[in-house]
């Protein structure tokens, strides 16, 4: 997890696809390591934690309220909810776990950007073996 934190710290000024591209080898390595395990819950929790860290990174990149409101609107939130969310005054970790960020940046959005799921990769490895 420390390795993921280091990659995400370097990603504050970079495009999110480049950050995800840097994460992929680490996540594949974790999937190969966890391939020996038959439990689902810790892998789901790890995937959720990674997505939340990425949402927090994106929130930090949108530095100003107006930018946050505009980006949230562009990702499908209605005007009032985007305005309330952009100006809530809470930190990136809280906002990354809030429903407005989960609605704007769902799991599918991250997979479209190239993020791999550890749980799905482990399932695929077990099926192909």
Image (spheres, helix red, strand yellow):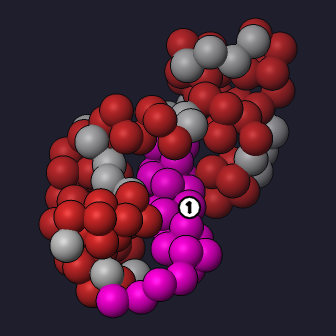
- For the record, the magenta segment spans 36-60
**In the figure, 21 relative to 87: above or below?**
below
Q: Residue at x 49, y 55 (%)?
A: 51
- Residue 49: tell me if it is visible: no
In the rendered structure, does residue 7 fall within the stretch colored magenta? no
Mark 1 neighbour class, 10 Å CA radius: few under 14, some 14 to 19, many 20 or more: some
Mostly what secondary structure, the magenta segment? helix
Who's the residue at 49% across and 74% down the image?
43
Secondary structure of the residue carrying tag 1 is helix
In this image, 101 relative to 98: left or right? left
Residue for badge 1? 48
Q: Is residue 62 above or below residue 128?
A: above
Magenta span includes 42: yes
Q: Vertically, is 43 above or below 114?
A: below
The quadrant in which residue 79 appears is top right
Tell me the quarter of the image containing the C terminus.
bottom left
Question: Residue at point 55% right, 67% down?
Answer: 44
The percent coordinates of residue 127 (x first, y second) are 29, 65
Residue 50 coordinates in the image, percent (x, y): 46, 63
**Which percent across, then down, holds residue 106?**
56, 37
- Residue occupying image coordinates x 65% and y 38%: 101
In-front residue for pair 29/59:
29
Indicate the position of residue 48 as horizontal and vertical percent values: 56, 61
Give above or below for 2 relative to 121: below
Whether residue 33 can be seen here = yes
Camera-side residue: 104 or 36? 36
Task: Tell me the quarter of the image containing the N terminus.
Answer: bottom left
Front in this rendered view, residue 40 or 109: 40
């Amino acid at each position: 997890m420390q390795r993921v934190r280091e990659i995400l710290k370097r990603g504050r000024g970079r495009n999110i696809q480049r950050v995800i591209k840097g994460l992929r080898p680490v996540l594949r390595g974790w999937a190969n390591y966890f391939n020996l395990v038959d439990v689902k819950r810790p892998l789901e929790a790890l995937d959720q934690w990674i997505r939340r860290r990425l949402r927090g990174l994106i929130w930090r990149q949108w530095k100003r309220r107006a930018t946050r409101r505009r980006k949230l609107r562009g990702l499908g939130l209605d005007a009032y909810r985007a305005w309330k969310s952009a100006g809530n005054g809470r930190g990136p970790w809280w906002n990354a776990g809030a429903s407005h960020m989960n609605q704007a940046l769902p799991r599918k959005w991250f997979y479209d950007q190239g993020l791999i799921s550890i749980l799905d990769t482990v399932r695929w490895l077990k099926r192909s073996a």
